[in-house]
Image: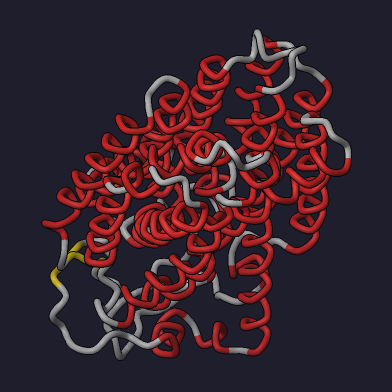
Amino acid sequence: MADLVPQNQGSPVTTRDALDRISPLLRSARAARWRRQIFAITWIAYAGFYFVRQAFSVAKLGILDDPAVNTVLTERALGVIDAVYLAAYAAGQFLWGMWADRFGPRVVVIGGMIGAVAAACIMGVSSALLVFGGAMVLQGLSQSAGWAPLCKNMGNFFTVAERGRILGLWSTNYAFGGLAAPPFLGWVAYSVFDSWHAAFLAGAATLAAVLLLFVLFQRNAPQDVGLVEPTEETDPESGTTPEPVPTEPSLTGLALYRETLRDRMVLTLGLSYFLLKPARYAILLWGPVIVSRRLPEIDKVGATLIPVAFGVAGILAPILVGWVSDRFFQSRRAPACVIALGVLTAALALFMPLTAAGSAEVMIAVLAVIGLSVYAADAMISCVAAVDFGSAKGAGTAAGLVNGCGSIGAILGGLLPGFLSGGVLFTGFAGAALLAGLLMLPHWNRLPRTA
């Protein structure tokens, strides 16, 4: 596990220097091509997961207006189904990151995509409550096979000194997925077929196409394509011996978890992410319904489109926060998190008063600010910092543990909107964001030793 020291040791390491310290082979044109390819295919892969993940959010509008099912699939029932999905998602996060460390990201991600497509197809042809519940368990377990293994995949090809910028840009994948999927699925479901079932089937078809691309173009590590020698000598300039990414499992799952749990920073990230995630998932899973409640004159398509502001800001946020953390804080991740969480606290606390007038323009602006701040903090905690503070052999386990904690919090984001009023809901989310910022504040100057 990487040791942590205060940042006061001179100028940051450049990307070029970082690559030199790993291996001259990573400076080659072939290496650059592979790094671009891995960036692209893993970005597309995680964005693709959202086209089945968001199908239920889009379908809720049709389900609640469908007299054939809305007496059984009520708002509370939909909230419970979301909670079931998120509980399965949380359980999977703790498992699949460790599996990615032991067996490689490829097999885990491919299995997750197959399961997600199957679950979406089941929900597209059935409306029985028990079938929905079972399919959502499968969907949750399958969706959780994406993030930690793909973070591990990216960490294998990019160094600590460049991860703020690179992983910040890469983390736009889930913001893009959350942005692009609902309008596309809503258009297919309500404009093309006039059936909420079509949202699930369209999402399944999209992810199936992404799965084919992933099988063709993804590789696990530089060693798999001949970019890093199996063993490396200590670098004469830096005096350090880089940790090569293991090609074979060297620790059992329990040993990986024990090693990861020794790092207090990883535990802090997990607790902070638990507090942050409910707000993001409430808007992600209930955004169209929240908009419809606050702006009752808006039709279904409009209620689906307005939360796009949340996703647009979410695409910009990881790029901005990653650049800021590398450029102004020299690879320290906590300052960017604390600032983003402060803005998020204010935006959530003011959501109900600002949207009380029923203005669509104000709703778009408030959702954009919430999206910018929540995705900035989310990307820093769940991806960049989680990979930074995990060891090379345990990066997937660290990312999985942090994201598993966040996914437990996300259960509340899926469940509570079906039970609580907007005022109570957003006040609670604001308090949780404030507490997350306070937890991160003492770690302002912390960073991995290798940075």
In the image, residue 43 lies at what x, y percent?
62, 62
- Is residue 247 among the parts visible in the rendering? no
The number of numbered discs placed on residues in the rendered structure image is 0
Height in image: 331 above or below 88?
below
Taking depth in this image into account, of 99 and 160 the one nearest to the observer is 160
Height in image: 361 above or below 91?
below
Does residue 88 appear left or right of residue 210 in this picture? left
In the image, residue 171 lies at what x, y percent?
51, 62
In the image, residue 378 lies at what x, y percent?
39, 54
Classify residue 196 by image quadrant. Answer: top right
- Is residue 335 among the parts visible in the rendering? yes
Q: Which residue is drawn at 67% across and 55% down?
A: 180
Hey, which residue is sitting farthest right in the picture? 193
Taking depth in this image into account, of 363 and 391 the one nearest to the observer is 363
Q: What colouring does the structure picture have?
A: secondary structure
Does residue 373 appear left or right of residue 190 in this picture? left
Taking depth in this image into account, of 223 and 329 the one nearest to the observer is 329
Taking depth in this image into account, of 304 and 266 the one nearest to the observer is 304
Q: Residue at x 56, y 36 (%)?
A: 296
Does residue 233 appear left or right of residue 190 in this picture? left
Q: Residue at x 22, y 66 (%)?
A: 335
Classify residue 451 by image quadrant. Answer: bottom left
Height in image: 13 above or below 167?
below
Does residue 262 appear left or right of residue 118 in this picture? left
